[in-house]
Image (cartoon, grey):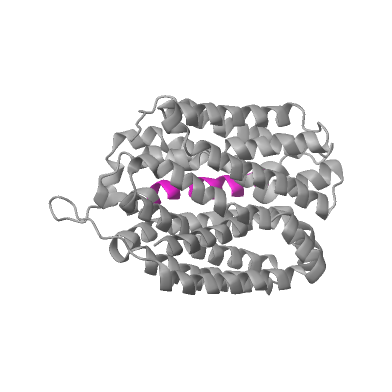
């Protein structure tokens, strides 16, 4: 089981890479195949929407077939074909198709590990384990920053993505061989339950709005807009963009490890999540008010957005605490659907938001973006303030 979990974490590392690598490849893709920043905003959003759309069937498959077949098959077919399609892309449409396939392939990996944690370990440590998986898996963010920029410059972006695609294929084979499915759990009345049973839990509806928006600023800025912001406003080159996105990726990793045990330290999940996300709004407010504070001051504020935006594992633990055992698979994937679906929709909206503002001065479109993310996150925090707290 431990070896299987190791390769699930590796699969999630690949998922993090695929959701974030477009920011670093922006310049190469614009030069080689003529895509625009708006095209890439759409491509990135399509990854998240495909990922989100798969959460319902993934949840059903986890409860019905277990994590081994669910994760190995989807990652092997969707992830590998998506990476190879991307490496061969000649138009924006090819990039869109590749990102959809990658979103499908990456969809089950994190939830498969959460399913195993929920079935195998004490509920009290769920948030810590969930945060650790995201923290370690977020090394994919690092691989998708400076190392990818170096590889793309040294070997070409097509060759670099092809190698990652082959690693994805090998990982899926190892998942099939090594994951051990935990025993199934039936409802007390012998039924399988349904999503309707989950949607009838009233406590979830004050948690879901923040789940929809909490990761969107960090994902949008790290995965797409940090690169163009650094290039357009500060004249950064590809290596500097790699350094900035690397800093943000490290901050996101540290944030996941930091959030994990805090519910047990402070005796509250709601309080930790709320304070953390309000700190994220403060970083966004600073970028909005002073959009040209200097390159590395801006990079530190972006890192702050990433660090404080890493509350997803604790939010998942908060929502999971309301699920009956036989609905864990569908419950955690439903919450993930709201989170990733929110990121996808907000990512797609960010392109028109960026475009609606005049391009001069160069920081003006990004100032509008920072305000857009800030308002959404504040709305989520206000609603979440009325949620029912629960710890295990």
382, above or below 318, in the image: above
Q: Position of residue 354 (x, y in %)?
A: 70, 43
> Where 385 falls versus 259 (above or below)?
above
| Residue 369 visible in rendering | no
Q: Residue 111, located in which quarter of the rendered image? A: bottom left
x, y percentage for residue 217? 61, 40
Question: Where does the C terminus fall, quadrant-wise?
Answer: top left
Number of numbered markers: 0
Residue 251 showing in the rendered view? yes
Identify the residue at horizontal 34%, vertical 60% (top origin).
Answer: 62
Identify the residue at horizontal 56%, vertical 52% (top origin). 136
Query: Which residue range is magenta in the image?
Result: 333-352
Task: Find residue 30 and report its image quarter.
Answer: bottom right
Q: Residue furthest front?
A: 2
Q: Is residue 247 above or below residue 289?
A: below
Q: Main secondary structure of the magenta part?
A: helix
The image quarter in which residue 83 lies? bottom right
Residue 248 inside the magenta-drawn segment? no
Quadrant location of the N terminus? bottom left
Between 49 and 218, the residue placed more toward the observer is: 218
């Amino acid at each position: 089981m431990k070896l299987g979990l190791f390769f699930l974490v590796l699969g999630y590392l690949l998922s993090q890479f695929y959701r974030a690598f477009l920011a670093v490849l922006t310049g190469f893709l614009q030069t080689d195949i003529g895509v625009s920043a708006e095209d890439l905003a759409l491509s990135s959003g399509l990854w998240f929407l495909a990922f989100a759309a798969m959460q319902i069937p993934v949840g059903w498959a986890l409860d019905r077939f277990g994590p081994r077949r669910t994760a190995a098959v989807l990652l092997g077919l969707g992830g590998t074909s998506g990476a190879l399609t991307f490496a061969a892309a000649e138009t924006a449409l090819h990039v869109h198709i590749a990102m959809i396939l990658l979103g499908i392939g990456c969809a089950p990996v994190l939830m498969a590990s959460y399913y195993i944690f929920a079935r195998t370990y004490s509920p009290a440590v769920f948030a810590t384990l969930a945060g650790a998986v995201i923290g370690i898996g977020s090394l994919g963010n690092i691989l998708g920053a400076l190392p990818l920029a170096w590889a793309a410059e040294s070997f070409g972006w097509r060759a670099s993505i092809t190698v990652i695609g082959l690693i994805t294929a090998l990982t899926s084979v190892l998942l099939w061989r090594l994951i051990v499915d935990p025993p199934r759990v039936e409802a007390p009345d012998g039924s399988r339950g349904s999503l309707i049973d989950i949607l009838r839990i009233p406590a979830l509806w004050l948690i879901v709005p923040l789940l929809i928006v909490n990761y969107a600023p960090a994902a949008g800025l790290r995965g797409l807009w940090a690169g163009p912001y650094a290039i357009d406003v500060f004249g950064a080159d590809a290596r500097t963009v790699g350094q900035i996105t690397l800093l943000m990726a490290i901050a996101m990793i540290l944030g996941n490890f930091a959030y994990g045990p805090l519910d047990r330290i402070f005796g509250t999940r709601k309080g930790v999540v709320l304070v953390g996300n309000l700190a994220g709004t403060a970083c966004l407010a600073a970028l909005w008010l002073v959009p040209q504070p200097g390159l590395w001051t801006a990079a530190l504020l972006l890192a702050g957005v990433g660090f404080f935006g890493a509350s997803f594992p604790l939010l998942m633990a908060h929502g999971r605490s309301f699920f009956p055992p036989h609905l864990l698979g569908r419950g955690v994937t439903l919450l993930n659907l709201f989170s990733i679906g929110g990121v996808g929709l907000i990512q797609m909206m960010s392109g028109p938001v960026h475009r609606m503002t005049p391009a001069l001065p160069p920081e003006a479109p990004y100032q509008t973006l920072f305000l857009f993310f800030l308002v959404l996150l504040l709305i989520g925090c206000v609603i979440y303030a009325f949620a029912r707290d629960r710890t295990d």
